[in-house]
Amino acid sequence: QVELVESGGGSVQAGGSLRLSCAASGVTWSYNCVGWFRQAPGKEREGVASTYTNGGNTGYADSVKGRFTITQDNAKNTVYLQMNSLKPEDTAMYYCAAVYLPHGLCWSTVEHGTSRDFPFWGQGTQVTVSS
């Protein structure tokens, strides 16, 4: 079993920055793909970014490219989402999730998959961006 815990959310003004953390514990070798998702009230969940934990390819939604960066610290079993130039439309609950996938499928699964594709989910952290 894997436990994921997000942190780092908060309230910022437009143009500001936040860094979200997704810390994993448990059977951490049972996944190799970590995705960040977000869901705003009344909207569908959106895949935001992804990375392979072995340092492989990353993926980003078009809406965050150039502003968000996903990184990882394997020594800490933690994946980060650096969010810069935040916009009010970035306001949402942000979740991280993890799964074991063959090479090349991480971002496509984050972008187009369902919740059932990821067996491990965190509890979420709220990001609020004011104009």
Image (spheres, rainbow, N blue to C red):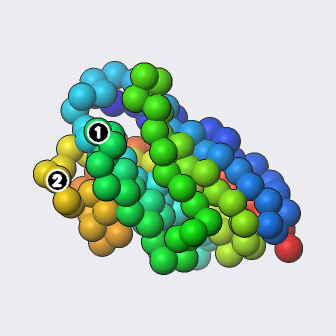
Q: Please, what is the three-letter code of the amino acid marked with disc 2?
A: His
Q: Please, what is the three-letter code of the amino acid marked with disc 1?
A: Asn
Q: Residue at x 20, y 44 (%)?
A: 100
Residue 21 shows which numbered tag? none
Q: Residue at x 65, y 68 (%)?
A: 90
Residues at marks 1 and 2, CA–CA distance in whole angstroms: 10 Å
> In the figure, residue 7 lies in which quadrant?
top right
Camera sees residue 55: yes
Name the residue tied to disc 2: 103
Q: Is residue 128 left or right of residue 50?
A: right
Q: Is residue 130 left or right of residue 105?
A: right
Q: Is residue 13 above or below residue 36?
A: below
Image location (x, y in percent) of residue 9: 69, 47
Image location (x, y in percent) of residue 96: 46, 48
Kindly indicate whether the residue at mark 2 contacts the one at mark 1 (C-beta within 8 angstroms).
no
- Per the image, label 1 sits on a secondary structure element best described as loop
Name the residue tied to disc 1: 54
Image location (x, y in percent) of residue 47: 43, 65
Image location (x, y in percent) of residue 17: 74, 55
- Density class for disc 2 (Cα within 10 Å; few <14, some 14-19, many ≥20) is few
Q: Residue at x 79, y 60 (%)?
A: 16
> In the figure, residue 99 lies in which quadrant?
top left
Q: How many marks?
A: 2
Camera sees residue 115: no
**Quadrant including the C terminus:** bottom right
Q: Residue at x 74, y 73 (%)?
A: 88
**Quadrant including the N terminus:** top left
Q: Is residue 17 above or below residue 130?
A: above
Q: Nearer the viewer, residue 84 or 5?
A: 84
- Per the image, label 2 sits on a secondary structure element best described as loop
Mark before the other along the chain sequence, 1 or 2: 1
- Density class for disc 1 (Cα within 10 Å; few <14, some 14-19, many ≥20) is few
